[in-house]
C-alpha cells in the first residue's frame, strides 16, 4: 500500500484512500453478522455440561442438541443467496438479525430439551444466512485493492465473537461460583450465557439501517442512480462512475440470476469451480476446528482440568484465534491466498498430531482422569498452535476465496452451496465428536490430522489464486 492519495492494484485500477474509513465502517457493520456467527457458534460451549445434567442425557443426545443448530445453518446458507438476489443484501441481514434475537430469548427460556433444540435451529438459520451474505456483500462494496483485507473482516468478526462469548461465559460462571447451573437472578448460569446474545443481535439489526445496499444488487434492480451514489461512497467521487456502472452492467448482461441448475456441468455433476468451493468448505471443517470452540471446556475437563481453568483456556484459545486472524488480514493481500493456506495446513497437521500423542497418555477414569505434566503441557501448547495456524490461514482464506473465486453468473448460488456444505461438515464433526472421543480421543485427533495433511495436495492442484483480480475477471 502506498501513502499517496490512491493505492495501485495489480489490475491497474486505483482505489481511493480518502473513502477508506467509510468503507471500513460499512464492512464492519456487515461483519457484525460474522460476530453473531462466532458468538452463537461458541456460546454453547459454556452450556454443554449444564444441559447434559439438567436433562439427564448421554453423549449422543447431547451432541445432537449442540449440533442441531448447524442443520439450520445449512438451510440458511442454502437459501440466503437466492433470497438476497430477490430482496437485497440488507433485508437478508435484517431477517438474520431477527432470527438471532428470537433464538437468543428462546434458548435462554426453554421449557424442555426439544424446545431448546428448536430455538437453536432457528438461530442456526440466522447463522447460515449471515455466513453467506456477509462475505458476498463485503466483496461487492469493497474497492478491489483492499478487498482481501476487507473480506477478512468477516473472519475477524467471527473470532472476536468467539472470544467475547467465552469471556462472557467465564464472567457468568464466576458470578455463579463456578457452577454452570448456579442461579443468578432466577435463571441458571447457562441460560444467561445463551440469552446474552440478544445484545449483539439487536445491534446487528440496527447497524443494517446505517449501511447502503450493494451497488450490484441496485443495478440488477434497475436503481442505477442509487448504485452510482453508493459507488461514489465506497470508491470515491473521483472514480469514473459511468465506467464502473457500465462495467458492472456489462458483467451482469453476461449473467442471469443464478440457480442450482447453473452449477451443473462437468464429469462429476457440478462445475469444477463449484467442487473446489465445496472442497474448501469441507476441509475447513474436517480438521476439527469447531471442536475447539464447541467442546473445549468439556474437552479439557475430560483430561483432568478443573472447570474454572477449562473455561479460562477456552478464552485464551479465542485470543490466539484473534491474533492469528490479524496476521492473516495483514498478509492475505501481500502474499496471496494459496501460500497462507499451505502454511496453515502444514502447521495444523503437526499441531494436531502432537495433541493426539499427548492425549494418548491420559490415565484414570471418570472424574479421576489426568494427563502427565509433560503431555499436559504439550497438549495445551499444541492445541493453541492448532488454532493459531487455522486462524492465520484457512479461517480467513476460505471466506476470502468463496467471496471471490466464482464467476459472476453463478456466484450467489455457488456460494450458497459451498456454505451449505461447510455447515453440513461442521454438523458431522460436531455431532460425532462426543461419541468419537468416548471411543478413542487420540484416534479422533489423528483423523483430524489426516484431513489437514490431505488439504495440502488439494490446495496445490485445484485451488486458484485470486489475489489482485476484480470480481468481473473471475471465470
Image (cartoon, rainbow, N blue to C red):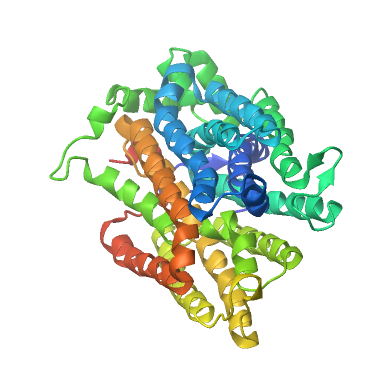
Q: Quadrant of residue 380?
A: bottom right
- Residue 470, visible in the rendered structure: no
Q: Is residue 41 left or right of residue 9?
A: right
Q: In this rendering, would 14 be left or right of 170? A: left
Q: Position of residue 68 (x, y in %)?
A: 49, 41
The image quadrant where one finds the N terminus is bottom right
* Depth order, front residue of 118/154: 118
Q: Residue at x 53, y 58 (%)?
A: 291
* Above or below, 295 relative to 198: below
Above or below residue 386? Residue 266 is above
In the image: residue 434, left or right of residue 247: right
Q: Nearer the viewer, residue 55 or 11?
A: 55
Q: How many numbered discs, if any?
A: 0
Who is closer to the viewer here, 278 or 241? 278
In the image, 449 versus 5, the foreground residue is 449
Q: Quadrant of residue 37?
A: top right
The residue depicted at 35 percent of the width and 34 percent of the height is 411
Q: Residue at x 30, y 61 (%)?
A: 458
Residue 115 percent location from the top left of the image: 59, 32
Figure quadrant of the C terminus: top left
Up-down: is 209 above or below 457? above
Q: In the image, is residue 356 above or below residue 151?
A: below
Residue 472, percent across and down? 36, 36
| Furthest residue toward front | 56
Q: Residue furthest left?
A: 267
Look at the image and tell me whether residue 79 can be seen.
yes
Q: Name the spot of residue 404 as percent of width and height, x first.
A: 40, 43
Name the outermost residue toward the top: 222
Amino acid at each position: 500500500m502506498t501513502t499517496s492519495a490512491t493505492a495501485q492494484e495489480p489490475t491497474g485500477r486505483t482505489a481511493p484512500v480518502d473513502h477508506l474509513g467509510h468503507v471500513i465502517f460499512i464492512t464492519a457493520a456487515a461483519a457484525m453478522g460474522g460476530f453473531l456467527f462466532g458468538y452463537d457458534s461458541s456460546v454453547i460451549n459454556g452450556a454443554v455440561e449444564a444441559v447434559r445434567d439438567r436433562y439427564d442425557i448421554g453423549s449422543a443426545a447431547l451432541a445432537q442438541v449442540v449440533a442441531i443448530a448447524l442443520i439450520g445453518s445449512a438451510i440458511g446458507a442454502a437459501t440466503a443467496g437466492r433470497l438476497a438476489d430477490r430482496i437485497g443484501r440488507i433485508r437478508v441481514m435484517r431477517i438474520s438479525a431477527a432470527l438471532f434475537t428470537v433464538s437468543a430469548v428462546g434458548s435462554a427460556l426453554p421449557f424442555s430439551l426439544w424446545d431448546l433444540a428448536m430455538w437453536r435451529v432457528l438461530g442456526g438459520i440466522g447463522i447460515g444466512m449471515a455466513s453467506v451474505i456477509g462475505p458476498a456483500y463485503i466483496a461487492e462494496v469493497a474497492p478491489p485493492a483492499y478487498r482481501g483485507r476487507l473480506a477478512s473482516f468477516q473472519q475477524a468478526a467471527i473470532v472476536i465473537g468467539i472470544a467475547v462469548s467465552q469471556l462472557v461465559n467465564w464472567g457468568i460462571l464466576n458470578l455463579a461460583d463456578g457452577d454452570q447451573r448456579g442461579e443468578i437472578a432466577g435463571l441458571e448460569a447457562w441460560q444467561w450465557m445463551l440469552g446474552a446474545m440478544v445484545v449483539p443481535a439487536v445491534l446487528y439489526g440496527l447497524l443494517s439501517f446505517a449501511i447502503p445496499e450493494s451497488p450490484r444488487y441496485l443495478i440488477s434492480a434497475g436503481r442505477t442512480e442509487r448504485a452510482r451514489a453508493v459507488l461514489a461512497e465506497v470508491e470515491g467521487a473521483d472514480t469514473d462512475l459511468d465506467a464502473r456502472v457500465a462495467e458492472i452492467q456489462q458483467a451482469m448482461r453476461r449473467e442471469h440470476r443464478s440457480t442450482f441448475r447453473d452449477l451443473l456441468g462437468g464429469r462429476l455433476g457440478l462445475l469444477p469451480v463449484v467442487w473446489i468451493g465445496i472442497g474448501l468448505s469441507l476441509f475447513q471443517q474436517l480438521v476439527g476446528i469447531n471442536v475447539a470452540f464447541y467442546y473445549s471446556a468439556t474437552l479439557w475437563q475430560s483430561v483432568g482440568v478443573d472447570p474454572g481453568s477449562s473455561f479460562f483456556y477456552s478464552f485464551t484459545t479465542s485470543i490466539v484465534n484473534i491474533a492469528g486472524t490479524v496476521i492473516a488480514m495483514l498478509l492475505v493481500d501481500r502474499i496471496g491466498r494459496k501460500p497462507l493456506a499451505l502454511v496453515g495446513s502444514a502447521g495444523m497437521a503437526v499441531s494436531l498430531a502432537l495433541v493426539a500423542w499427548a492425549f494418548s497418555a491420559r490415565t484414570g477414569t471418570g472424574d479421576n482422569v489426568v494427563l502427565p505434566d509433560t503431555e499436559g503441557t504439550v497438549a495445551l501448547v499444541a492445541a493453541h498452535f492448532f488454532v493459531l495456524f487455522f486462524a492465520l490461514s484457512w479461517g480467513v482464506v476460505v471466506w476470502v476465496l468463496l467471496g471471490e473465486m466464482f464467476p459472476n453468473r453463478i456466484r450467489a448460488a455457488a456460494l450458497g452451496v459451498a456454505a451449505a456444505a461447510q455447515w453440513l461438515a461442521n454438523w458431522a464433526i460436531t455431532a460425532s465428536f462426543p461419541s468419537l472421543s468416548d471411543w478413542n480421543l487420540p484416534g479422533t485427533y489423528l483423523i483430524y490430522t489426516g484431513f489437514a495433511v490431505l488439504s495440502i495436495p488439494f490446495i496445490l492442484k485445484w485451488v486458484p489464486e485470486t489475489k489482485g483480480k476484480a470480481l468481473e475477471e473471475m471465470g
